[in-house]
Amino acid sequence: MIEKLKQRWNVRNGWDVLIILVVFACTGFSVLYVKRWLFDLIGLDAQSPGWLRWGVNILIILPLYQVILLIWGWIWGKFAFFWEFEKRMFSRIGGLFRKRSPEL
């Protein structure tokens, strides 16, 4: 599995893979804490409408995740990797909304 990740992410060794996985884990935990704090701040809880919680997640938490990912990447010395990772991800997301030419 480590070898597959090394190839997929184009990194040198297993330690780089480990650091990348740690960054993803730290980001996930950080976002959970920020989300709880933010939901308390704006008054959202389990009784709030699901569409509202989903909307806040998509409009605020998702972009915040990207910022926190870059911060943790910088802390762990992998900013360049995560910057490229985010650019690829946003280009794929943007591709979902691009108008495709009709196939003949």
Image (spheres, rainbow, N blue to C red):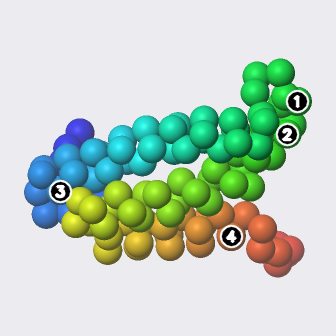
Tag 4: amino acid: Gly
Figure quadrant of residue 71: bottom left
Q: CA distance from mark 2 to mark 4?
A: 24 Å
Residue type at the position of mark 1:
Pro
Number of the front mark, 2 or 4? 2
Q: Secondary structure at mark 3?
A: helix
Instruction: Using the rendered image of the protein, determine whether residue 44 is visible from the camera's viewpoint.
Output: yes
**Residue 64, how many percent across, how many down?**
58, 57
In front of the other: 24 or 103: 24
Q: Nearer the viewer, mark 3 or mark 1?
A: 1
Question: From this viewpoint, which residue is outermost toward the bottom?
Answer: 101
> In x, y percent, where is residue 68?
46, 57
- Image location (x, y in percent) of residue 94: 68, 70
Residue type at numbered disc 3 = Asp
Q: Residue at x 88, y 30 (%)?
A: 49
Answer above or below: position of 9 versus 79. Answer: above
Front position among marks 4 and 1: 1
Labels 3, 2: front one: 2
Using the image, tell me which numbered label, if any, was put on residue 94: 4
Give the residue number, with chain letter if any, for mark 3.
Answer: 16
The residue singled out by tag 1 in the image is: 49
Q: Is residue 32 left or right of residue 38?
A: left
Which circle's residue, 4 or 3, is located before the other in the chain? Answer: 3
Residue named by callout 2: 52
Q: Nearer the viewer, residue 98 or 78?
A: 78
Q: CA distance from mark 1 to mark 2?
A: 5 Å
- Amino acid type indicated by mark 2: Leu
- The answer to whether the residues at label 1 and label 2 have Cβ atoms under 8 Å apart is yes
